[in-house]
Every structure is written in C-alpha cells, then in structure tokens.
Amino acid sequence: MSIKSRRVLPGFGLALGYTLVYLSLLILLPLGGLILKAAELSFAQILDIALGERALAAFRVTFVSSLLAAGINAVFGLVVAWILVRYTFPGKRLVDALVDLPFALPTAVAGITLATLYAGNGWLGRYLEPLGFKIAYTPAGIVVALTFITLPFVVRTLQPVIEDIETEVEEAAASLGASRGQTFVRIIFPALFPALLTGFALAFARALGEFGSVIFIAGNLPLVSEIVPLLIISKLEQYDVLGATALAVVMLAISFLLLLAINLLQWWTANRHHNAEPLEAAAGRVSGNER
Amino acid sequence: MKSTRATQEPAWVRIVLLTVGLGFLFFFLGLPLVAVFVEALAQGWGLYAAALREPETLSAIWLTVLIALIVLPFNVAFGVAAAWAIAKFEFRGKSLLITLIDLPFAVSPVVAGLVFILLFGAQGAFGPWLSAHEIKIIFAVPGMILATLFITFPFIARELIPLMQAQGKDEEEAAVSLGASGWQMFWRVTLPNIKWGLLYGVILANARAMGEFGAVSVVSGHIRGETNTLPLHVEILYNEYNAVGAFAAASVLALLALVTLVAKTIVEWRMKKETDMLNAVLAPEKT
C-alpha cells in the first residue's frame, strides 16, 4: 500500500531533498561547527571551564530559577487550565487568548516592563519592597521574568487533556461515593499528570536558555544573579571564544537531553490518549503548540 | 442537572480557583501589558510621537520588517516541503527528522547566535575567506538574517505536519489520478487545504522573527542605524535611561504582539470551523 501511494503522489524526492539540504545548511552545519570548535578542548578542559567558580554559580542560578519558574507555572498553570476548560466567566475567551501573550511579546519588552514594575518605585515594587521583598535586580527578578516567559506552556499542554477527560468517569466516581476531592486526587490528577510533567519540562527547557527578558531585571551580578547565556556573551565580548564555546556545548548537551525527555513524555501522554479522534487530536495540537 | 453537580467542585472551591487563576494572570500578564503603554505615554502623546519619529527608531523598525520579509518566504518553502515529505510519505528516519526540525526550539538563542560567529566571525571557520573577499556576515545584516532563520526554523513545519497528516492523501491522489500535474495538484488541492494552518505558522514565525532578541543581539554588533532591530533599539534606549523612548519603541512591539494574538485567534476559529465541518461530513460515513 505504502509503495503504491509513494508512486501515486509526486514530489517526494524534491520535498525531502530540499528539507534535508536546508536543515543541514542552516541547523546541522552550524551546530556541528560548535561541536568541532569545542573538540579543540579536551573533555577535562571543558569540565574545568564549566565548573569554574563563576560558571558554576551561573549554572546554579540558571537551574534553580528555571526550576522555580516552571514549578510556579505547574501549580498556577493547572488552576488556569482548569478554570478555562471547566468554568464559565465573563471575558473567558479574551483571557484564553491572552495566555499566549508571552509567546507573542518580544522578550526585551517583557524584560524592561517587568523591571519597571518591580523596581523600588514601580507599581508593584513600591508595595513589595517595604515588606522586605526586593524583586528587581535580585535572583528573585530572574524567577519573575522566567515565570512570565514560560507561562503558556503548562496551560496549553493541559487544556486539551482536560477537555478529553470523560465526565462519565467522574460521575461514576461520585456515584460510588467519592468526594470531589477524592475524585480529583484519584481520577483527575493521575490522568493529567503526564501532560503536567510535559508542560513543566517544556517550560523548564525554555527557561534555561532565556536571555532577553532576564538581563533587564536580574542585576547581572557575577556569582549572584548572572545566568549562563549572559556569561557566554561576556566571554565572547572578552574574545574568550573557547570559553564561550565550552559553556555553549554544555548548554547544548543539556538541551538535547531535555528534548529527548520531552519526546518520551509526549509519547507517554499520546499513548494515554490514543482514543481521541485524529482530527480532534490535530486541532488540539494546533491550538496549543508554539513550543 | 444533578449529574453535572456530581462532577463540579463546591461553590467555595470554584471561587477560590477562579480568584487564584485570574489573579495570577492579572499580575503576570495583564499588568505588564498595561504598563508598557502607560510608561510609553507617561510624558504625553507629543513626546511619544516624537520618540517614534526619531530617525534611529524608524530605521530600526525598517530593519525589523526587512529581516522578517526575507526570513518568512524561506521558512514557508521549507515548512511546506518538510510537511509534504513527512505527512504524505513513509520513509526511514522520519521520527529522527521530526526531532531534528524541533531542535532550534531547544537551543538557547544565545547559542544560536554563537554558532554563526564560530562559522563566519573573524576567527571563525570561514572568517579568513570572507574577509579576503570583503564579505561581512557577522556584525552585519546577513548574520542577523541567518540567526533569525535558525530561531524561526521549526514554526511553520510544526503547524503543517500534524495538519497534513490528519488530512491524509486521498484528495491529492484523486487529483493526480484524474490527470492533474504535480503543481496543479499543489495549487488547486493542497494549498487551499492547508492555507489556514500555513497562515497560522506564518503569524507565529513572524512574531518571533520581529521580536527575537538574544540570537540577533549576539551577531548584530549593535551599530546604530545599521544593525539595530527594534528589540535591540529598546535595549539601547533603556540603558540610556530614556524611558519614554524605550517604552515608545516597546509599545510598537506590544501592539504587534496584540495584532498577532488577534490574528491567531481568528485563524484558530476558522480552522476549528473547518475541522467541525469536515467531522460533520465524515461522521455518517463512519457508522
């Protein structure tokens, strides 16, 4: 069957050939160049650069703030996805459309706006700083920026899955005497968990590499509030190309691992929801996928 | 009515969840969006308009548009070709190819800029050859185009692949067996079928292309009036403590983001309508 249809439709060679050439020239060749450049260093030298005092601190700041931002979004994203699917309230469609704002708003705009809001004289900073919460120009500012940037991931991953939950299962649980809380913990949450984890991982992966929004609000103090992408740039500006390359290769390796983990998670999620209609599944993916 | 109540939370839980969810969105989305425009207009409309008419701001807007206009056709051609091969044919290594297409999403923008410096920079692999022929890529517009191409590479293909997979290949096969040439089939059958999905991908890719900061920043060299896109110009003005200028430029980008959201919502609505219609047509055949 597949052999026959391969003959019927034209353009396979042209389309695949163009795809492979374009992919190789634009993506694989540059990334390969990075790895070749890094190969000028030994493995021990790369580790030495990545584990230097300043780099190690930058990795710690980047990882901890990305984890916190993804965690905040996992909690609040679950609530937001739930109310957007299950509840009705005025302006719901507007709110739903607004969730994608962080994907549409350039990161530099987000950066200067959040820095202005949370600065000592800003709309939020003027109330938070007297209470002892200094956000702008501290590591907490990094978490705020990353939370904004990665906000849509958990919501958009969860929405189609919540829509797919059959209310009959919930009714059955209720009619068997389960309280609403028990139904949530035993029935709903386990069904949502793979998607929640996927959304968390997508948010985390995006947060790790984020640069534009963070640099305006972070204060960028070495050892305290300097993220890895910024350290790569400052090495580059000091003509330490090998140092920048070493850090970039470590980041790239982490990205690869996360991409692999996310693919496995999505495969897990898809396997749990294979009963969905193909068209509906496609529509769901279309409305939630600018990862 | 009673059966729905069994699958609803108690009223107080609903109120708490609505307050928490909407409060979160208000502080993290609503307030920043409003703040951009309030800060831009803080000194009145006159200064706002003057800030936008600065020659350097105008040239930044122009370069931003120019880069998007060059980048988008390349990614449209790639997206359609990749989706055609992946959705309509079976071949080995397909899932590897899909993963590779996703790769730029996982790469930090700063790393995306760095890879082009390593290739085309002064000390890069092709650096000596380029400088011998007086071709400038890094710290010039070609490098910024390459970095933007890299960053926006997956957007259109990602939208088209699931869409074309869901549509199957019956219609194209019918067209070809009725004697249509390959291009006739593409223009008359395939393109009308995928137009909304394609537009959706273009909208997303355009927003990213015009708003990209990290990757473009690394390769631009920040030469005013020459290699400054609007997001980079926002940074320069902000660092000069020119708040009105920075937020005026930022407000243009925020408007672009709002237009993007509106266009995206309209296209989503159109796609859902077509999907529903298709389901309604297919449903009787299935039973």
Image: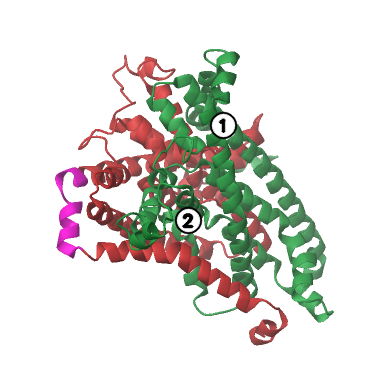
Chain colours: A red, B green
- Residue A276, quarter of picture: bottom right
Does the magenta stretch mainly form a helix, a strand or a loop?
helix
In the structure shown, which secondary structural element does the residue marked by tag 2 occupy?
A: helix
- Residue A135, quarter of picture: top left
In the structure shown, which secondary structural element does the residue marked by tag 1 occupy?
A: helix
Image disc number at residue B150: 2
Residue plotted at (55% across, 28% down): B251
Q: Is residue B74 left or right of residue B137?
A: right
Q: Is residue A48 magenta?
A: yes
The three-letter code of the residue at mark 1 reads: Leu
Are labels 2 and 1 on one chain? Answer: yes
Residue plotted at (61% across, 48% down): B69
The three-letter code of the residue at mark 2 reads: Phe
Query: What is the spatial separation of the Cα atoms under label 2 and label 1, in whole angstroms?
Result: 26 Å
Residue plotted at (24% across, 33% down): A221
Q: Is residue B20 visible?
A: yes
Disc 2 packing (10 Å; few <14; some 14–19; many ≥20): many
Q: Is residue B110 above or below residue A249?
A: above
Q: Is residue B21 magenta?
A: no
Residue picked out by circle 1: B58
How far across and down, in percent of the image, does residue B213 sit? 45, 41
Name of the residue lying farthest toward the right: B178
How far across and down, in percent of the image, does residue B142 sit? 48, 52
What span is in magenta? A41-56
Q: Report the front residue among B158 and B40.
A: B40
Q: Is residue A261 left or right of residue B246?
A: left
Q: Report the front residue among B244 and B70.
A: B70
Image disc number at residue B249: none
Q: Is residue A247 left or right of residue B179?
A: left
